Image (cartoon, rainbow, N blue to C red):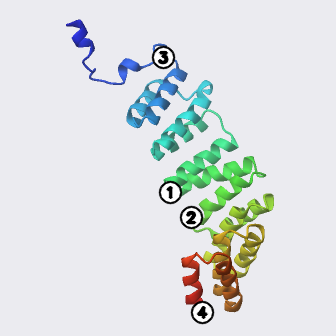
Amino acid sequence: PAAVAATIPPADPVAPWLPRRPTPRAHAAFAAHLARAGRWQDAADVVAAGVPAEPPVVADFDALAAAFHHAGQWGLEAALRSRRLSIHSSPDAHAAAAAAWARLQAWDPALLHARIAVRSDPANPDWQARLGDILDAKGETMEAIAALTEAVRLRPNDTALRLKRAGVYRSAKMYGFAVDDYREVVKQAPRSREGAMGLAGALAESGNRVEALAAIETWVEAHPQDDGARQARDRMK
């Protein structure tokens, strides 16, 4: 009977595997394992029961938040990242919290954390770009452009940053500035389809259809298999 009873699954499938030494770090490691295994509710329960917001478990909070992120539980991730900040504040942690809240489209807490990250580490172009993204999502276009401009100044050869800023310029109908960014992208990365098509689009929107057609023709000649670009060229003609 004892052997048979041992094969019967317990009513609570998590409790038997709780750490024998119930330290906060052990609970945090177990919760991260559960989250990565897709058992995010069990993981949340283990966190609530045994992972206090105390300095010794700061790094464990980061690992837990990452585990919840990969499990697709962005709300729990955002809550954990904010709770981690109550233990110890750092630019990286604020930037991570900003990204987590932005994934939930909770723009106010995202903006708060992004601003703190930038104030704490203004020379980091990634934080400036994240602030720009959030401001753009909130409709604060000119502030977004200012943040992205600072990011480009800090990392002028980053074509992704220039493409991001060019897109915001276009949404604000500032086509001349968008053209300048797209030209720089095409110069630095001639194989960038987004840069080439963006340049053609921004030129057309600025009223310069001759240069727009020339830009798209250049791309089509180099990439004749690009059906979408050929169709865009034909429409422009």
Sort mark 2 into few (<14), some (14-19) or many (20+) by Cα contacts within 10 Å: some
Q: Residue at x 67, y 53 (%)?
A: 115
Query: In what element is the residue under mark 2?
Result: helix
- Residue 174 visible from this viewpoint: no
Disc number at residue 105? 1
Q: Do callouts 4 and 1 mark residues in contact (Cβ within 8 Å)?
A: no
Residue 207 placed where, x, y %?
67, 90
Q: Nearer the viewer, residue 32 or 226?
A: 226
Query: In what element is the residue under mark 3?
Result: loop
Q: Is residue 153 left or right of residue 65?
A: right
Gap between marks 3 and 4, in whole Å?
71 Å
**Amino acid marked by disc 4:** Lys
Residue 158 placed where, x, y %?
74, 60
Which of the two discs, 3 and 4, sits closer to the camera?
Answer: 4
Sequence order check: which comes first, mark 4 or mark 1?
1
Q: Nearer the viewer, residue 211 or 67?
A: 211
Disc number at residue 22? 3
